[in-house]
Image (cartoon, rainbow, N blue to C red):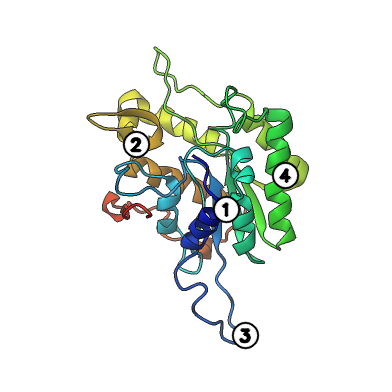
């Protein structure tokens, strides 16, 4: 269901870290840089009515220094196209500031060829929409970062983890090279992680419950694992420095994941 522009604006304000607008900056003080996320349900904030489903964006703050707050604008069911068409990119760009980061992860819903509101073609419209995020962030003095889509849980009969995103990761990699922006290859890394874990162990990383067998969305362990991959890539690509990162090699208790009450 599409939201009104007023609802989009309200959601954007809710995603801004608490205190960011209320506390005046002291003269000469360095403003905290914010990590914005534009993406789909695999990254999005989840609420108590969806628990234990967990977006990797919910776990990202566990690995970042307190001077790097996260503003998670990812929303269930959105593609690179529908996120723009609903005014959600405009809401991000209204809030983002020089020195901030914009992490962009889409493809899960871009792939839905029967839905004209969301579908994009990998080598044409997908890249065209992604350029809007890059251009918009750059115009605001922020740094855009592309992240290939995290892989679903899919194995063949021999236990091999299978890629599910077709040409979209390759199209994003090519665009990153063309535009000279950092690429977090979450697709390749998550596929390798699912392979190492295997058919049964991966069930504890995805939203498998007594009533649901979900091979797309994560439980807390999966969200934490993917957030760790994202941060490792942010270090590898030198988007972030080692001083920006904490707990990268530590066990993160799943109890740290909490689900707030649904928005009114």
Q: Which residue is mark 3?
A: 28
What is the spatial separation of the Cα atoms under label 3 and label 4, in whole angstroms? 34 Å
The picture places residue 259, in percent across and down from the top left corner, at: 32, 52
The secondary structure type at the circle numbered 1 is helix
Q: Quadrant of residue 136?
A: bottom right
The reply to whether dot 1 and dot 4 touch (C-beta < 8 Å) is no
Determine the residue located farthest toward the right in the rendered image.
Answer: 178
Observer-side mark, 3 or 4, equals 4
Q: Please identify the residue farthest to the top as the structure is shown.
A: 157
Is 220 above or below relative to 244? above
Q: Separation of disc 1 and disc 3 at Cα?
A: 36 Å
120 relative to 13 in the view: left or right: right
Q: Is residue 179 left or right of residue 48?
A: right
**Mark 3 or 4, nearer chain start:** 3
The numbered disc on residue 100 is none
Q: CA distance from mark 2 to mark 3?
A: 44 Å
Judge depth for marks 1 and 2 and give the one in front: 1
Query: Is residue 143 depicted above or below 84 in this figure?
Result: below
The residue labelled by disc 1 is 5
Q: What is the quadrant of residue 260 in the picture? A: bottom left
Helix, strand or loop at mark 3 = loop
Q: From the image, state whether disc 1 or disc 3 is nearer to you.
A: 1
- Label disc, if present, on residue 131 of the rendered structure: 4
């Amino acid at each position: 269901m599409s939201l009104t522009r007023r609802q989009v604006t309200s959601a954007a304000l809710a995603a801004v870290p608490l205190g960011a607008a209320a506390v005046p900056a002291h003269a000469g003080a360095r403003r905290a840089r914010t990590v914005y996320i534009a993406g789909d349900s695999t990254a999005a904030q989840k609420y108590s009515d969806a628990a234990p489903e967990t977006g990797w964006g919910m776990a990202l703050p566990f690995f970042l220094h307190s001077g790097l707050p996260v503003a998670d604008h990812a929303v269930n069911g959105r593609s690179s196209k529908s996120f723009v068409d609903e005014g959600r990119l405009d809401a991000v760009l209204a809030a983002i500031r020089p020195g901030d980061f914009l992490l962009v992860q889409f493809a899960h819903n871009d792939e839905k060829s029967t839905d004209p509101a969301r579908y994009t073609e990998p080598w044409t419209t997908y890249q065209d929409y992604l350029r809007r995020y890059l251009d918009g962030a750059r115009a605001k003095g922020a740094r855009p970062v592309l992240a290939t889509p995290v892989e679903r849980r899919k194995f063949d009969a021999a236990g091999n983890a299978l890629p599910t995103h077709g040409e979209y990761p390759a199209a994003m990699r090519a665009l990153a090279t063309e535009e000279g922006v950092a690429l977090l290859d979450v697709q390749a890394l998550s596929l390798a992680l699912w392979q190492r874990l295997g058919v049964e162990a991966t069930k504890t990383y995805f939203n498998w419950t007594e009533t649901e067998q979900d091979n797309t969305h994560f439980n807390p362990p999966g969200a934490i694992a993917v957030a760790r991959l994202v941060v490792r890539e942010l270090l590898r690509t030198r988007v972030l420095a080692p001083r920006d990162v904490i707990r990268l090699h530590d066990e993160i208790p799943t109890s740290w994941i909490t689900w707030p009450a649904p928005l009114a």
